[in-house]
Amino acid sequence: MDRRKVDAALRAMRDRRNILAGGCATAVMAYLPPLLRIEIMRDFFQITGLFFSGMYGPVFEFIRRFRPSSWILVALKWLRNIYNIVALDASELLHYLSDIVAIVGTGFFLGGILLVHGLFIMVVVRYWWTMPRTADTVRHGHEATTWSMLATQNPRAAKLATLFITYCLTVYLPLTQLAYKVLVVTNKGSDGQGVKLTEFVQQFRDGPWWFLFPFEAVLILVTFSLSLPLLLIWSIRKNRPTGSIENEDITYNLDGDPVNFDDKVYTKLISTDPNQLDCPYRSLYAGFERNWSTYKVMQMVAKIVIALIVVSAGQSVEVGGTLISTFYCGVVILSQYSQPFVSPFDDKMEMLSKFTALTTAIGATAVDYAKKNNWLWNPDRALRFMGFVVVVHGTNLLVMVLATMMGLLGDESFQVRIKQILGRLSFSDTSRGVADAQAKDVIMKWNIENEAKHRVWQSFWRAILLEMATRDENAAEQDETQVRSTERLAQLEDAVIASGLIRIKAHCIGQECRYTAQLRQLARVALEGVDVFWNNPLGARDGHLDSVSCFGKMYIVPYPFHCVVVYDDADDEAVVRDICDENSTADSHMNIAELLSINFTPEILAKREMRQKLRVLSDTATKVNLPFSRTEKVFLWFKFRGWKRMWRWIYRPVFSIPGYYKFECKYTKGVIRVHTSCDPSGIWLRVVTSPAVVNAKQWIANLCAHNLVVSMKQQLQKVIKGKNVQRVKNQVLKLAQMEELDSPAHTTSTKRIMADGFNVTMEYADGQGTVLLGDDGDDQNIIHEIPVIGPRKTVMKADHIGLKPSMEESSKLHEIFDSTRAVWEAGLIKLRKQHQDYRRNLADVHDNQNAALSDGFWFYVYNNARLPRSKLEKYLRVRESNPLLRSLPDTHTEELDALYRQQKWVFRDPRTTCWYVFWDDVYACNSDMKFLDPQDFDPSEPTAICNQEPMNRNDLEEWLRKRNLLGKYRFFNRTLLDLLYAKLDKS
């Protein structure tokens, strides 16, 4: 089978987002231009439309005055109308409606704004902070919910999220601009310039409900315009691809060799990783270089700054235009300096659109200066410049039309046509992931050995696994392993990219050592899960261990074997590996042995059991009798205290003064709670203890030195602790439970069985007390008792029950455990059984994967191109569990014969290997060009040049000349042949 067809079929099987799965919407999207180019056009239309609506009123008056019949005036009017429509500036579109229709339309429009704003807030509170994050995969381990998993469980969730983000970006500038305009109208009054900017709300200015307009405008600016960029930046940083788990700047290629995590690797992961393909935030950073992944958000910030200047300046174009031109010139310089897009065409398209918008702003500013006949700008010069502006706009629109046509035809199809016209051959480097590159950038950098391995040996095994998966239409129903073998190969390749060849080799060597293999199995059977202790500071990913207790959740990645400890009380993770050396197997288990030995010492076992007891008491909500009292405050309104005699038979009523009064509150029984990172309270705690919130608290604490600030803080705390605020908080926590987005048939919960985090509290709900008020008369001994309405609730920290960060059992904890022995003794049995079931389930998953393709297949077979046939057949029959692979030497004898004949030829000597790789790549990258005859270039044909003896240069030139392929600049030119023979000589 042709290697290119095999690779295409494997990619199609791995990419679940095909037209059949995506339905009509996916089919339609396949024929649209790339989303990134559509967004470049959208940003241009919005910015330029903003300039036209806010700055070009005086320009039109100026042109009518000096050149009333000028073609420039007609062109500018057409441009303004087009941009306002495309930019969705409803405030300008409503000008074209009649008064009655405008009032009704404005009402519907503002109602829609309220709906959009409310929907945005609901989505952020309800879904945004509970959605999966790529960065959390390291901490969540096996229980991590990836974007590909979410797309499988709830296909509409990721699609709706992507559409919602795109919609927010589209309405961001119009909505922010509208909020600015409303505030300007409110500030300048009904006769000010603000109304001239926003005539469509003038009829509401003096109405009784006008106060709602500025109120909603402020809410939009705070909760939408300012918060959306922050949310998007946070989402980009949490979801964009990164390097290896130990070093985010290093990754590995398909051969397991370390490479820098540069823009090429970053871009390839975005376009091929299933988790990235299903990530809704991908549209924010796809197509941008790694260092400029937040470029789109930076453009959003630039938009609102420009809108602020345009709206605030009003009709003063001289001031506003100067500020805008200066600011936007900086934006253009930044775009030129950064070149943020991966595609050079997108960079040029972005630069041209930015330059066009800049000339638009400069043109309006020049006209305003020309009214005063400035020494720099006079009317004639300003009119000529406006003509230049129109020409630039026309050029930019033509480029956008060209970009749209390229998108409709497909960039690859367009490039093929260009290649055929120019006669330019492209090349690839399978080791470095380079495709469609020039010969000078590829040929001399080839690793010939690896290139031949990829094109011959690995191509054969990919074809075999694909044949197993697609032998007949009912393969999935007959034998599940047939289908999963291709997916398993993809998993093994992902493991190589994540860990590298050295660690893959160490894993295989360790499995050959019986003692090391037993230690690994023991760690999976007896230790994996929560309440694992690891105090080795060298294991921390950031090189510094911040955890005090050194306890956390540990999950094990079985291939290549390594343990990841996620600490409960710190934002730290530790990776425990053993680098095995075949020459020194005695050191192949040092770290794993230390991890096991320290966790089964009597001291750590006692601490783990204590933590498990607390988990049982928390799960069962056992009430613990641990009474205490403390002084609290309660607010009392007017309370009748009795009658006081004033004179003879004249009495007056006595009331308490409203205010806060201290009293002794007594609590008796409480419930111990163990909060993890997946609980609603744990999510709230994670937000509260995040670095950003901690820094904000520190900043507020520094401000609290002033008494007034202290008083305001106290009042704010009282409001926060009020019942209404607590009720809202509880509702938010309930909403934080991530459920199904549409139908109840697909439910995804944030509840994780083995979640990190061990925040212990004790909740009381039986607080009672009495406020004692002394007599305000002569007899101070008379005490009035006022019962406090209750019961009162409180939450005490871990030290209340005597729990220390070192996890040592205190006397208080000893008493608690003695009083609840009947509960936790039965609960421990159930809890430990749950943990064993969890580990057994993970082992079953790994066994099923090995049943399709063993862990060692990649290292011993797939990556070993010089493996003798006898050893290959022995490995397949002994090591593999898949019956199709075990019987492969018998069922595919002829195919193996052909493979080893080709292997013998290709690896005959380095010169022959280089010759084969060159001509194989010529056909693989350029077979769609008609002048390449398959009989001469297809490697599957025995007459192909790659299967012939390497020729000297004169013979090759004569061979190419007979086929009209030897050119001066096109096809196989002198420069290309120089590179070929330089590489042959080097080999």
Image (cartoon, helix red, strand yellow):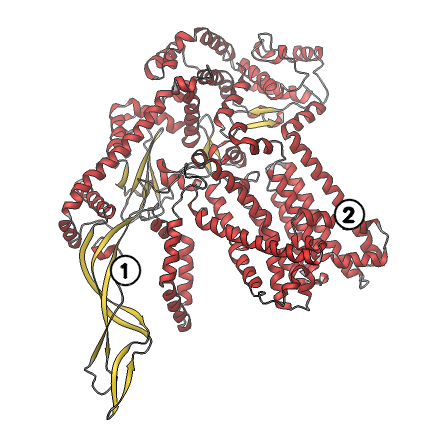
Task: Residue at 64% x, 62% y: name it.
Answer: 312
Q: Position of residue 633 (x, y in %)?
A: 29, 69
How many marks are shown on the rendered structure? Answer: 2
Is 486 positioned to the left or the right of 38 in the image? left
Q: Position of residue 23 (x, y in %)?
A: 54, 31
Mark 2 surroundings within 10 Å by alpha-carbon count, few (fewer than 14), some (14 through 19), many (20 or more): many
- In the picture, residue 711 is in which quadrant? bottom left
Residue position for label 2? 390
Q: Position of residue 716 (x, y in %)?
A: 40, 66
Is 154 positioned to the left or the right of 851 in the image? right
What's the residue type where badge 1 is placed? Thr
The numbered mark, 1 or 2, whose residue comes first in the sequence reads 2
The image shows residue 519, relative to residue 793, as above or below, that is: above
Residue position for label 1? 794
* Nearer to the camera, 673 or 915: 673
State which quarter of the image contains the C terminus.
top right
Q: Position of residue 947 (x, y in %)?
A: 57, 10
Task: Residue at 34% x, 24% y: name it.
Answer: 848
Give the structural element (helix, strand or loop) at label 2.
helix
Residue 138 visible in the snapshot: yes
Is 54 positioned to the left or the right of 156 in the image? right
Residue 304 visible in the snapshot: no
Q: Nearer the viewer, mark 1 or mark 2?
A: 1
What's the residue type where badge 2 is placed? Val
The image shows residue 531, relative to residue 651, as above or below, that is: above
Is 388 positioned to the left or the right of 595 in the image? right
